[in-house]
Image: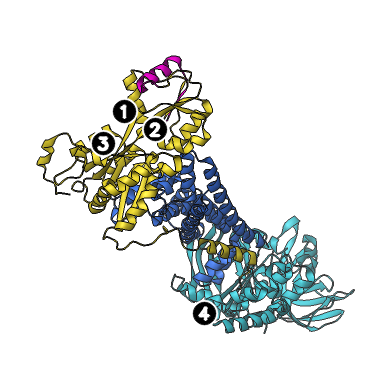
Amino acid sequence: MRFRGNRVVLLGFAALLAFLGLDGCRPGSPPAARPPRPDVILATTTSTQDTGLLDYLLPMFEKETGYRVKTVAVGTGEALAYGSRGEADVLLVHAPQAEQEFLKKGLGEVGWLVMHNDFLLVGPASDPARVRGLPPSHALAAISKVRATFVSRADNSGTHKKEEELWARAGVSPGGPWYLRTGQGMGETLRIAEEKQGYTLTDRGTYLATKSSLTLVPLVEGFPELYNVYHVIVVNASRFPTVNREGAMAFARWLVSPHVQRLIGEFGRDRYGEPLFHPDAASAPAGERPSEGRGGMSPEPSSEENSRPAP
Amino acid sequence: MGGSIPGGMLTALATEPLLRLEEVSAGYDYHPAIEADRMEVVEGERLVLLGPNGAGKTTLLMVLGALLPPFRGRLFYRGAPLTRSTLPAFRRRVGILLQEPHLFRGTALTNVALGLARLGLSRARRREAASAALQLARADHLANRPAHRLSVGERRRVALARTVASSPELLLLDEPLAGVDPPSRRDLLSLLPRVLDGKTLVMVTQSLEEALAVADRLALVIGGRLVQVGTPEEVSASPASQEVERFLGGEVFLPGRVVRAGELSLVALAGGGEVRVAGPAAPGPCYLRVRPETVSLHREPPRGSERNLIAARVVGVREADRGCLAVDLDAGAPLRALVTREALTDLGVRPGERVLAAIKATAVALVSRVR
Amino acid sequence: MDYRLLLEVSRRSLAVSGLATLISLALGLPLALALAAGRWPGRRVVAALVNAGMGLPPTVVGLTVAFLLFRGGPLGFLGLLYTNPAMVIAQVVIATPVVAGVSMAAFQQLPRTVWMELAALAPPWHLRALLLAREALAGLLAATIAGFGAVISEVGASLMVGGNIHGQTQVLTTATVEAVRKGEFGVALGFSAVLLGLIFVVAALLTLLQQRNRR
């Protein structure tokens, strides 16, 4: 039976096939040599991903080493959860307390200091709560006192955790019609804050990226409590045999290497006029840098009793 | 060829029948539509399933064609029960024409070729056979017409061609002439002999006339039951029940042969004797449909208008409707007269005695048999 | 708007969802036929499951497939998580009940005589399948459109098993979500527009086929 073809339909599907061309493999030159186990799963936070730093750095890492990094950008909580199950090889997160817990439980082999960026408190130019220049916790106390609109991410992200920390320091439990919870990412939260002309805590990267569409201005910045510190953690392979230890270690070392640290320090300058991050690996304390012995942020030296292979 | 084999002889020949049903109950959705204790289809015969609308004839045909598994009972093909392994061979040798045949997307020719799909022939042979079948059905001019652009009559023809294309030994036709206008009807009827050609036929119809034109034997299906099977003359002579008699209109069917056609045709009865029948008729085998109330009994040939006189012997007398009496006669073939009590007393005959049965030429209908 | 990115992501969406739809057709059509025409024990239970499956939340599917593909999971050794094949698998799970359910209804709509004729004519199985497909074509095309639409527009499963990895597993839907999260609404709209465009083109082509075949 002859196919009662409709020429238009055939042409249409042919066009779609042509459109497909190659399937969406990652474009780019294949690296020199692929290591036996090339895939490295990096769990990080959405705000880190959103700065664009990884999109900038990773192709270089891949080209140099042949590893292929799969960046899964989720919330801090989820990233640590993946690590705690061995579903990720290496983590890049910025939640010091949670990271401490993680390493204390022996879930991570090493945790090295990479960089920091900082948070800012932005708000309407009119500054109804008069917070300009105040230390962060004082500023928050003032905001809650006058019930000025404050927009919170409320999504258990690193930013949100920092915010909670500051509220705790201020001795205030925020709540009420003036305290808005968005449950969303930084970009959306900033937009909502802009709409409502409210205060919000944001990381510098996202702020710089959205600055042009905002009338909100930075009101509190530069205080040490506002620093947002990043560590790279290699998930403990002796706990989780499926972890790609070589790849994870290679990435972690690479990230704290002087050359890459320099790149990190330059990132964002041409776009925003100022860099987004400050590289810290060079000034990292003993426990947070690669060493001949075992490394890790664990404050208990007794954990060295469990002999782990030298990295 | 006619294929008018007397029923009695068939049973005598009794080798294994082509098809046999035993204790069958069948229907759709758990509700029985037909029950038949026992039924046989003899090779080479033409069996007509006859009955009123909704009686279950189609269902019975579907069972015979193994298209509907019965709730209970079995179907035997050449003495062996049909199983999964013997089914394909059965299908290859059976052609089924449904009451509302479905033509698939494509031309008439491709549809007819579908009728050959189960035979495993080469494409060239299929095309050949399909063309031949279309020719046989006098539909070859429709070969390349798309199926959805065929008229009802044309679809029937094409479907019929599809059914016979595989030269099946058994044809099951479900009301092939239903819903077709009279001229096309005659046309289709005349196609049957071309198409039948020695095959076994089981046909379903509601029309007594069609049945008489075609059947060697009748299988009467009334109210969801197979009530009687036999030749037309057998069934009309001794209807198994009142329902059967009522369905047949109380008529008696006499087999015969038209020996001279004309305004007044002459029919030679199989049982002996001649009858003149008003109206033109085609020469050849036929059935006369006689209504018992139009049969009058006499001792002597009566004077008067043209009457056909048949010598007969009184077999019995019994009560009939409305206080009349039915007189069963043997005139070489069974016959029946319906008379009033007075008429019978006037006649003064008793069972065993000879009488003359008179039938008016205008009061008898003639059905030509399809050869 | 980075047009190269848009092109890369659109191609991937089309490839992943297109392939998933084709596979689900290969799985769903025979299943639908068996459900519509067959008489086997448990048939009605399976039919109910298929119909229920049409409403499977993609996120639930994504979660389940992810659990299977996690390194610690039963199929972890395959190393399929965060790859395109993983997304295809999840989308096949989403689309197959849709395709099967709609096709089953299409087959059941065929008049009984079609089945009887097919029984009487007893064509070889491939011819039988072809005949049935052509008879039920309108419904089968609807099933295809429904299946494709369901998977190309889902985000829950793609996000979970694909991970939205830039340059590797990012598709239109996950890219849109990411753009919204970053506050880049213009970009999000761009991705959405292309997504709608793709859906429309495919649906239009299939509709042309479907409507062309009316008797």
User: Residue B291 appears at what percent x and percent y?
Assistant: 76, 67
Residue B120 disc label: 4
A189 or C74: nearer the viewer = A189
Q: Position of residue C72 (x, y in %)?
A: 27, 49
Whether residue B64 appears in this view of the structure is no
Compared across the picture, whether B334 is left or right of A262 comes to right
Residue holding disc 2: A155
Question: What colour do you see for chain A?
Answer: yellow
Indicate which label's residue lies in the foreground, 3 or 4.
Answer: 3
- As rendered, which of B304 and C22 lies closer to the eye? C22
Where disc 3 sits, the SS reads helix
Q: Are marks 2 and 3 in contact (CB under 8 Å)?
A: no
For the residues tagged 2 and 1, is the chain the same? yes
- Tags 3 and 4 both on a single chain: no
Depicted C3 relative to depicted B68: above or below: above
Q: Which chain is cyan?
A: B
Asked if residue B119 can be seen in this view, the reply is yes
Which quarter of the figure has residue A64?
A: bottom left
Q: Residues within 10 Å of mark 2 (few under 14, many from 20)?
A: some
Of labels 2 and 3, earlier in sequence is 3
Q: CA distance from mark 2 to mark 3?
A: 18 Å
Distance from the alpha carbon under mark 1 to that under mark 3: 19 Å
Residue of label 1: A224
- The residue wearing badge 3 is A99
